[in-house]
Amino acid sequence: MKTRPGSRPLVLFYVLVFYVLLQFSWWTYLLVRTNNQVAELQREILQYKLGASDNLVSSSLLLEKQKQLDDELHKRWMMIFGEGAVFILLLTIAIIRTRNGFRKEALMAERQKNFLLSVTHELKSPLASIGLQAETLIKRELPKEKQSMILSHVLEDTERLNSLIGNILLAARIDSHVFAINPQSGNFSEFLESLCNKLAAGVGQHHNVVREIESNVHFDFDNNATHSIFTNLIENAFKYSPAGSTVKVQLKRNGSSVICSISDQGKGIPLHQRKSIFERFYRTGSEETRSTKGTGLGLYITRELTELHGWKINVADNPEGGTIFTINISLSK
Ligand code: ATP
Ligand code: MG
């Protein structure tokens, strides 16, 4: 029988919680009962002394003592219930936190498994394709145009492998906190324009790429990290929207900040997934039904690198349908 990942320790945890609660209720019951029995015995002794006393002064003293005993019993009850309430409160907090921790771990394990499945597939398929194309070139005498077409496919596959391995290594370096950026002043408009041209001619060749890039916008940025941020966002826009639709890249100055946005006309991202898409390995849908290739590292890297620069990233609905990712770059230091 197939069980959900992490469900077995969770069942054990619930059994333990049930046992603790059962024990707690039992000991509370015993404590209250023992207290009541002690109070009852003390009351009986006093009643006996009261019956035996014929002195008015000692009788009133005994009555006073009985009242004290009642007060004491009441205080003990309050103490038991007060401490019990604190215990239950702390236990509830611990249960919720532990359960959430278990669920998070299980979810991460599931995502890691999916990541391994997709990464294995994505490493294998371009390698197989490169091998096949090299074999064709070696074994067959082909006209020059056919040869260059095959070679350009080999180049595409190599680029795909390169970008995949690059993302995996980058994510590993970010995770181990050994990654630092080195921002330097530069013309961001030129940088973005040239990246757009490169991607539009490659992965975006079946899309209508609109560029609204304000010229000569200068600020400090790390070349490699920024390349990775915008490549991931623009590639996602191509990947998650239908061929022939428009992908728009905008850059404009807005007072003391710069706004850069990438919008597409794809199916969009539901509101409840907008936080999760920036988590490591997160991909929408299940690995079996997913039609697009990917590892779920792109937006994780994008968010980490954006934050390292001190920029803010946002995702929203594109008014023209689809998604719009916006990066807000503050120029005031
Ligand atoms: P890769 O690591 O190769 O980039 P990926 O594209 O699946 O893989 P992310 O870029 O981190 O991973 O994106 C995470 C998920 O967010 C995607 O699987 C996709 O479901 C969703 N997503 C990202 N960008 C868009 C977009 N523009 N439109 C719709 N969904 C998107
Ligand atoms: Mg991606």
Image (cartoon, grey):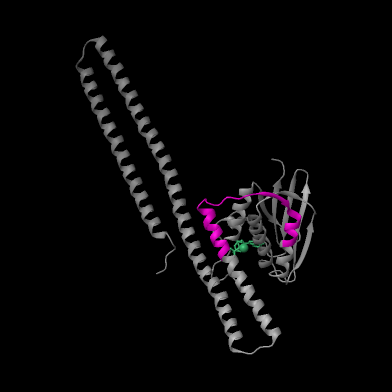
Viewer-closest of 144 and 208? 144
Quadrant containing the N terminus in the rendered view: bottom left
Q: Is residue 296 visible?
A: no
Where does the image place residue 153, in percent across and percent down from the top left?
65, 77
**The magenta stretch spans residue 94:** no
Between residue 63 and residue 317, name the one nearer to us: 317
Residue at 54% from the left image edge and 54% from the top image edge: 174
**Quadrant of image for the C terminus:** top right
Classify residue 37 as left or right of residue 313: left
126 or 89, which is in the foreground?
A: 126
Task: Give the prevailing secondary structure in the magenta stretch.
Answer: helix
Indicate the quadrant of ligand 2 in the picture. Answer: bottom right
- Write the residue at 38% across / 34% down: 83
Above or below, comparing residue 195 to residue 51 in the picture: below
Residue 214's x, y, as percent?
A: 80, 54
Quadrant of the image occupied by residue 321: bottom right
- Measured as percent of width and height from the top left, residue 171 is found at 55, 58
Magenta extent: 165-194
User: Residue at 61% of width from left, 48% of height from top?
Assistant: 308
In the shown orientation, is residue 218 left or right of residue 101?
right
* Residue 263 sits above or below residue 146 on the image: above
Please, which residue is most extreme toward the bottom here?
Answer: 141
Indicate yes or no whether the magenta region holds residue 179: yes
Reply above or below: 248 against 139.
above
Front residue (pair 290, 192)? 192
Observer able to see residue 166: yes
Left or right: residue 33 versus residue 306 is: left
